[in-house]
Image (spheres, rainbow, N blue to C red):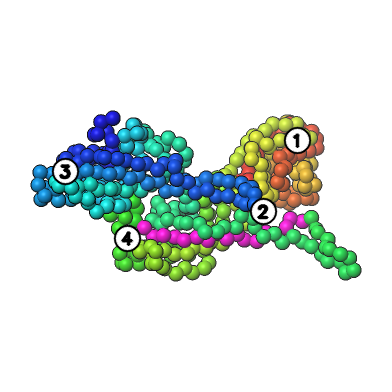
């Protein structure tokens, strides 16, 4: 391999700067790992390898015809290495690939006559190789992130902050309904839906510039920090309870709010950092799914295709039921199997004629018959929902007629 192909940084080869030669490169990719183990009683129960921060080192030889020229050449090399910021770095042993790196250290020159050797350290943005043509990573996904969108604003893209999660409620506290009986051991557990407490998510917000800025790595000035704090306060506290979506799970929306204050700290991060705690409602909602079915009542609808991952909590169902027959329905029942919960429309003049539509909104507990309020026709029961693991609803009509049923829901998760 030719010398000119050994190292390219920021689209510049060392020899383009003058009499500069690459003596050696060393890429630690795949060689340095943190091994995490679970141990008990002298046994390793499980083991996993986490790659360390990727570093690339290179030895450069700089030559000149005089001592003064050597100093100028060294200065030119330093400007190239430090002034390129985070840039593509290509090595001789990975043709067609590059990594995103920044030069973080240049050793003191070792002089020998009219030449000097320096050792350079590059720290890569992540451990992956990228394709020169497409710019895509050869393996893996984007670097792991604890980022989130709150009240429609992304913590990094819109607010210029990096969020590092420290702890988060994985399983909410459950308070079941129990009753103690005097003289008997234990308690009686009622089968009603248990009460779930709010979740919390706590971490640290690091104020920063956007990396694409010309001075992206320069700390914020005190004036810039104060302006950013005002903007963050308006976003976090002014939004009240709003939608929270984690970058790692963009299909689930949580209701969250910030109720605790936060102190600004500069230790360890000059631009400033703040501890942030979210109070999150215990049940999150997935993206809306919908599907249409045809059936002859009485019959059962299997909703498995709408919920391939199932549901994690009681999921309200919105139903649009259209009478496709010619006879008017005078009694209609909707049963959620596994819950023994039936919603029955009957009496008080209820009639779902041919071509007419009954709309049922379970979360709002609202019903409409041909656009008119129909709650007065509810003879018994409660609005339909799916329990965790339940994938069916049954519909019965009097008389028996063909029905068109559209089901819409936001799967619930805890």
Residue beneath the point at 42% across and 55% down: 162
The disc at residue 219 is: 4
Give the magenta-colored segment's residue range: 192-208
Q: Mark 3 highlights which residue?
A: 63
N-terminal of the two: label 1 or label 2? 2
Residue beneath the point at 68% across and 36% down: 304
* Residue 250 appears in the picture as rendered: no
Labels 3 and 2 touching (C-beta < 8 A): no
N-terminal of the two: label 4 or label 1? 4
Q: What is the CA distance from the residue labelled 3 to the residue labelled 2? A: 60 Å
Q: Sort mark 1 into few (<14), some (14-19) or many (20+) by Cα contacts within 10 Å.
A: some
Q: Mark 2 highlights which residue?
A: 41
Q: What is the CA distance from the residue labelled 1 to the residue labelled 3? A: 83 Å
The disc at residue 300 is: 1
Between disc 3 and disc 4, the foreground one is 3
| Overall secondary structure of the magenta section | strand
Q: What is the CA distance from the residue labelled 3 to the residue labelled 4? A: 36 Å
N-terminal of the two: label 3 or label 4? 3
Q: Position of residue 275 (x, y in %)?
A: 47, 64
Q: Position of residue 111 (x, y in %)?
A: 19, 50
The verdict on residue 193 being magenta is: yes
Q: What is the CA distance from the residue labelled 4 to the residue labelled 1? A: 63 Å
- Give the image quarter of residue 389: top right
Q: Position of residue 247 (x, y in %)?
A: 49, 48
Give SS at disc 3.
Answer: strand
């Amino acid at each position: 391999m030719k010398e000119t192909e050994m190292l390219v940084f920021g689209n510049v080869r060392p020899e383009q700067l003058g009499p500069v030669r690459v003596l050696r490169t060393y890429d630690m990719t795949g060689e340095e790992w943190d091994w995490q183990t679970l141990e008990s009683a002298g046994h390793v129960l499980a083991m996993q390898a986490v790659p360390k921060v990727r570093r690339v080192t290179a030895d450069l030889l700089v030559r000149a015809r005089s001592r003064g020229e050597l100093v100028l050449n060294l200065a030119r090399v330093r400007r190239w290495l430090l002034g390129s910021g985070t840039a593509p770095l290509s090595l001789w042993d990975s043709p067609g690939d590059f990594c995103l790196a920044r030069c973080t250290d240049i050793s003191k020159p070792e002089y020998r006559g009219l030449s000097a050797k320096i050792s350079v350290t590059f720290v890569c943005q992540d451990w992956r190789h990228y394709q020169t043509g497409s710019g895509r990573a050869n393996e893996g996904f984007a670097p792991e992130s604890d980022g989130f969108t709150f009240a429609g604003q992304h913590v990094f893209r819109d607010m210029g902050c990096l969020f590092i999660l420290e702890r988060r409620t994985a399983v909410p506290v459950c308070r079941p309904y129990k009753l103690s009986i005097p003289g008997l051991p234990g308690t009686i557990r009622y089968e009603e839906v248990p009460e779930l407490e709010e979740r919390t998510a706590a971490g640290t917000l690091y104020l920063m510039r956007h990396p694409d800025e010309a001075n992206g790595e320069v700390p914020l000035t005190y004036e810039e920090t104060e302006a950013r704090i005002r903007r963050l306060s308006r976003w976090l506290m002014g939004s009240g309870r709003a939608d929270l979506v984690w970058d790692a799970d963009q299909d689930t929306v949580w209701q969250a709010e910030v109720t605790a204050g936060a102190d600004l700290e500069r230790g360890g991060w000059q631009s400033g950092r703040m501890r942030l705690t979210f109070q999150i409602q215990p049940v999150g909602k997935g993206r809306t799914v919908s599907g249409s079915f045809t059936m002859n009542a009485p019959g059962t609808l299997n909703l498995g295709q709408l919920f391939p991952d199932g549901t994690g909590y009681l999921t309200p169902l919105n139903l649009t039921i259209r009478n496709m027959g010619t006879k008017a329905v005078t009694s209609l029942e909707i049963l959620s199997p596994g819950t023994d919960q039936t919603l029955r429309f009957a009496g008080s003049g209820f009639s779902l004629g041919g071509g007419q539509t009954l709309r049922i909104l379970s979360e709002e507990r609202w019903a409409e018959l041909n656009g008119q309020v129909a709650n007065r026709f509810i003879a018994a029961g409660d609005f339909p929902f799916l329990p965790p693991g339940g994938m069916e609803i049954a519909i019965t009509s009097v008389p028996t007629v063909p029905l068109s049923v559209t089901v819409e829901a936001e799967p619930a998760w805890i």
